[in-house]
Image (cartoon, rainbow, N blue to C red):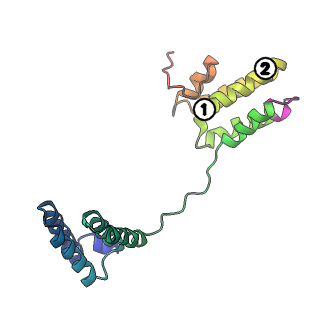
Amino acid sequence: MLAESQGSPYNSLYNATMAYAQFLNTTQRVAQAEKLMADYLSSHSDTNPVLEANALNFLAGITTDAQRAEEYRRLAAGKWPPPPPWPPAQNSIRELMTAAQKAAGQQPFEDAFSLTMQAIAAAPEAVDRDTIAEWPFESVANLIGQKQPARAEELYQNLLAAAEGWSSDTIQPLSCASEGKCESQASPRLVQG
């Protein structure tokens, strides 16, 4: 299949046929364009499935028969290879911070504190690490800080230490944490020093 898409005679013939069909369509000879591509497909059953789907979609777009257009689309959809599977869930702190925020609404705050510390520890390897210093963290730390300021201070100190470790990659978590003003849409800021 790859060979056909990289310079085989079939690919050249397909490209030439498609170009001519497009020309016929552009010059108001739709019936000829449709016949040309339909004939090509019927005589080249070994056409790359992606190219065949492309040709079928072209036919669906030019035909004046609504039923035939739908049939072309249906056939084209069946030619596409299945999409690759999504990669396995990568390290993310979103669930930890969501759980921490939920736990912060209840007392005692130990669960919220523990979950937030877990998120901070996981953040350096997380795909969404920059979100650690945004609203969930600030909300949790502020709720805890209302009753236990020392615990909130501990969260911020751990956040600063973690964010400093990757601040060369992105400045947003460090600047957000050090300023104590974290917003969900915080933009990167320059740190002058």
- 96 with respect to 38 (left or right): right
User: At numbered mark 2, what does the secondary structure look like: helix, strand or loop?
Assistant: helix
Callout count: 2
To which quarter of the image does residue 134 belong?
Answer: top right
Residue plotted at (69% across, 29% down): 137
In terms of secondary structure, what is the magenta stretch mainly? loop
In the image as oriented, which residue stretches furthest toward the right?
Answer: 108
Between the C-alphas of marks 2 and 1, the distance is 25 Å
Is 109 colored magenta in this rendering?
yes
Task: Tell me if mark 1 has few (under 14), some (14-19) or many (20+) residues whose alpha carbon lies within 10 angstroms of its own.
Answer: few
| Span colored in magenta | 105-111
- 2 with respect to 7 (left or right): right
Is 180 colored magenta in this rendering?
no
Q: Earlier in the sequence, mark 2 or mark 1?
A: 2
Question: Dot 2 corresponds to which residue?
Answer: 145
The amino acid pointed to by label 1 is Gly
- Which disc is residue 165 wearing? 1
